[in-house]
Amino acid sequence: MTIETVWKKFPIRETELSLSKVLRCGQTFRWKNINNIWSFTTNDRIILLKQDPDHIHYSHIMREGTTGSDSETFEFINDYFTLPINLSQLYTHWKFQHEKFKTPTKISPFDTFTGIRILRQDPWECLISFICSSNNNVKRISQMCDKLCVNFGKYINTYQDHEYYSFPSPKELSALDVESKLRELGFGYRAKYIHKTALQFVNDPNITLDKLMELRESDHQTAHDFLLQLTGVGPKVADCICLMSLDKHDTVPIDTHVYQIAIRDYKFKGKKDMKTLNKTTYVAIREFFKDIFGDYAGWAQSVLFAADLADLNNGTNIKVEDEIEVETKIRLKKSRTGIELKEASRKRIKVEA
């Protein structure tokens, strides 16, 4: 059955919101792009988005047997993409700050990577998504989030021959057989983390979805400490959740990639070959970026991170393959038989950058 969609639109320039950049830079993992239409499920509906240089066009498809309004869909979009925040003004400030450190031969990322803003995601989905992100890449995280919905969520509807499901609740992920099913689906050790975290939300009166949502009103340290109670959540994952779902706009999640950006582009004093970050260094870099970029330092860092990737199909912790040419030469002295052995070869191999 073909479902008719009615499209609405609102004016917004790509410099304020670029769907193709924001939805592929490692913040969110469930948006699908089918024939240049972005699609995503929330609660009772499929959200549909497309963009031209001056407008976002939006529509929705409701769960079978339910009804919903265009105004509700717009309210979701307005909140999810934090549209009340003027991104152009922020970019002007970030560019001014960046110029103090800029290398003359290097183009500012705030000139080339416009339209990137931090999303305001559902905290529960953001939490589980970033538990999946541990030692992972965007493609696999996206596959895992899709498997969570298909296997544990509720069916919503079908659009362009694709079935859409809701993101599973703590109750749906706390059933006895969830961990074993997740392992069968390829989640590895993350299966245990997801199941145990869901159980915490179901069984512990001090850890609830309401309390998680209330962290939007708390300070960063309170939110961070709450998240660190949860199985599979470390400092960086906690900061990702704080930034991308709990309104902690100045929070800068730090990994070795961001550490290298701080040293290379902003003259942070540290060891270039550091493989792991201790707590002191982690906090120092986070405060370092906050001092430079201010109250929206986390937003600025997301632009730097996206600009530093080879392309936007890559994301947090993704492994980038490259080819290099290796020349091998073997020379032996002339033997007693008078035969000189030589070998020279060239081959191309793939390496992980």
Image (cartoon, rainbow, N blue to C red):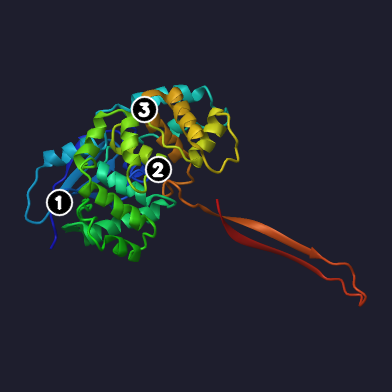
91 or 135: nearer the viewer = 135
Residue at image position (47%, 40%) is: 255
The residue singled out by tag 3 in the image is 296
The three-letter amino acid code for the residue at tag 3 is: Tyr
Q: Nearer the viewer, residue 77 or 169?
A: 169
Residue highlighted by disc 1: 61
Q: Earlier in the sequence, mark 2 or mark 3?
A: 2
Is residue 281 left or right of 56 when viewed as pictured?
right
Circles 2 and 3: CB atoms closer than 8 Å: no
Q: Could you tell me if residue 18 is visible in this image?
A: no
Which of pointers 2 and 1 lies earlier in the amino acid sequence? Answer: 1
Instruction: Note whether residue 187 is visible.
Output: yes
Q: Within the image, what quadrant is residue 191 found in?
A: bottom left
Q: Is residue 333 above or below residue 238?
A: below
Count residues near mark 1 (Cα–Cα under 10 Å), then give few for <14, some for 14-19, many for 20+.
Answer: many
The residue located at (16%, 42%) in the rendering is 73
**Left or right relative to 279: residue 149:** left
In the rendered structure, find residue 234 and report the number of the disc placed on it.
2
Q: Earlier in the sequence, mark 3 or mark 1?
A: 1
